[in-house]
Amino acid sequence: MALDLPAGGALRCGAMTKPNPNRDTIFALSSGRPPAAIAVVRISGPRARAALEALARRVPEPRRAGLARVRDPETGEPIDEALALWFPGPKSETGEDVAELQLHGGPAVIAAVLRVLGRIEGLRLAEPGEFTRRAFEAGQLDLTAVEGLADLIGAETEAQRRQAFRQLKGLLGARAETWRQRLIEALALVEARIDFSDEADVPEDLVGPALAVARGLRGEIAEALSGAARGERLRDGLVVAIAGPPNAGKSTLLNRMARREAAIVSPIPGTTRDVIEVHLDLGGYPVTVLDTAGIRDSTDPVEQEGVRRARQRASEADLVLWVTDATDETEESEPDLKQKATDWGNEGSLPAVWIIRNKVDLLTPNNKVYNDSYKSEYRLSNIAFYLSASTGAGLDSFFAQLGHHLGNYFGSEPALVSRERHRKALEATVVHLDRALADGAGGREDIIAEELRAAANTLGRLVGRVDVEDVLDTIFRDFCIGK
Ligand SMILES: Nc1nc2c(ncn2[C@@H]2O[C@H](COP(=O)(O)OP(=O)(O)OP(=O)(O)O)[C@@H](O)[C@H]2O)c(=O)[nH]1
Ligand SMILES: [Mg+2]
């Protein structure tokens, strides 16, 4: 589907031209999977009013619910009794005329209404995200708000919901737009200097103040970027990998965390082969927990592959729970886990590692670590927990510490940047600002202007004001039909 972009590719939010009367009118089931108590069918476009009149015979007052007998306009046969709503454009969600029917949510009711709508001239079923796309094109939402909306619909935990809602309400979009405006003003100063440099009444120093603005913006954008990892993690979940020697109780611990039998547990060492992934909501924060194959040397090629995957996923995780059998006296008491992670080939930042001494229920006074058991402690850089994944002993303090860790990690301030797309755009902006500020630009006003213009453009792309056609399909693909 092509966007109707004005010449030059500039898409102006909030100032779109009148809706196109020849455009298709779209409709879709906007509520969830039937059967349900209520089904919401939405219609948007120039023929929305005609469609509502055809089905319900009359159109209620704008933005007021009215009872309507929904009929097949060809046969006159009643289909259902519904609540009808009428939102004339441009003050509607899509900026176009929008009608909404709240029907009884049975599959046959919905099928009949969609069938009847499909027969009306100029109406067709909406594509995924098409209502939102129209809202974006009408300037009702900027692109970051569109993404916030997708995230809000996808939010599974409280923290995700909060971040998504703030983004929908312009947390990032409004900031980026102010930055862009300030850059455009700075750019105007430099351009004035270039264009009128011969004229006597143009002040000498217009470039200095422009660069001061650029320097200030660079600081603010870098600050926003510092929270990017946190924001992106909040969308995907913090990755916690359970790793350690075979038979230590890793899968038992995963099942405890998931509160279900997600992984096979058996007394045979080498049970888990593939990485098992479970998504959890821990205290409102999203966490992805990975159970991995016990790490040991093996001649079995399948197990070898399992061990390779275990090492790799553990080295890429945010937090590794290194599970050992507390009764195993041969286990290192203080394994150098940072070293392990490095050995596994991790190239980025190393994960935090907690040691879990499992099976404390089996400890006897003869065991070396017996006196340490049933308490959690910080040892050097590692945090160690003594617990029993099968009896549950010690799990409370483990979960409390994990909750604390998540709270600290995600923090109370929402991150401005929650997607790679945002991060890349802001990083590119910083690069252009740095070039404008570099000594190398050394008074070359044309270079400074070019870099400021490029910086303003990357911000424009971020909010969806310029040249965004290429990213639109990717963004709207995430939406469901009816949104
Ligand atoms: N007594 C006791 N047994 C446990 C505990 N945790 C796990 N087990 C037992 O230890 C055995 C191995 O448990 P798993 O959870 O399969 O161990 P794993 O680390 O996933 O093993 P692999 O997948 O083979 O690497 C099973 O028989 C479990 O019932 C515990 O806290 N106490
Ligand atoms: Mg296992």
Image (spheres, rainbow, N blue to C red):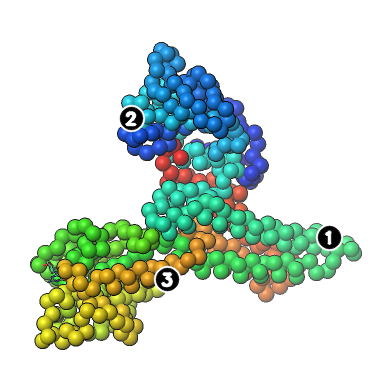
Q: Amino acid at mark 1?
A: Phe
* Numbered mark located on residue 408 in the image: 3
Residue that appears at 31% across and 58% down: 279
Q: Earlier in the sequence, mark 3 or mark 1?
A: 1
**Pointer 3 with pointer 1, Cβ within 8 A:** no
**Residue, disc 2:** 106
Q: Quadrant of residue 369?
A: bottom left
Assess disc 3: are there few (<14), some (14-19) or many (≥20) residues with their C-alpha within 10 Å of its C-alpha. few
Assess disc 2: are there few (<14), some (14-19) or many (≥20) residues with their C-alpha within 10 Å of its C-alpha. some
Residue that appears at 44% across and 51% down: 151
In the depicted structure, whether residue 156 falls above or below residue 238: above
Rendered location of residue 181, percent (x, y):
68, 57
Rendered location of residue 109, percent (x, y):
36, 26
Camera-side residue: 75 or 427?
A: 75
Residue 303 located left or right of residue 22: left
**Pointer 1 with pointer 2, Cβ within 8 A:** no
Residue that appears at 34% across and 65% down: 239
Q: Is residue 246 visible?
A: no
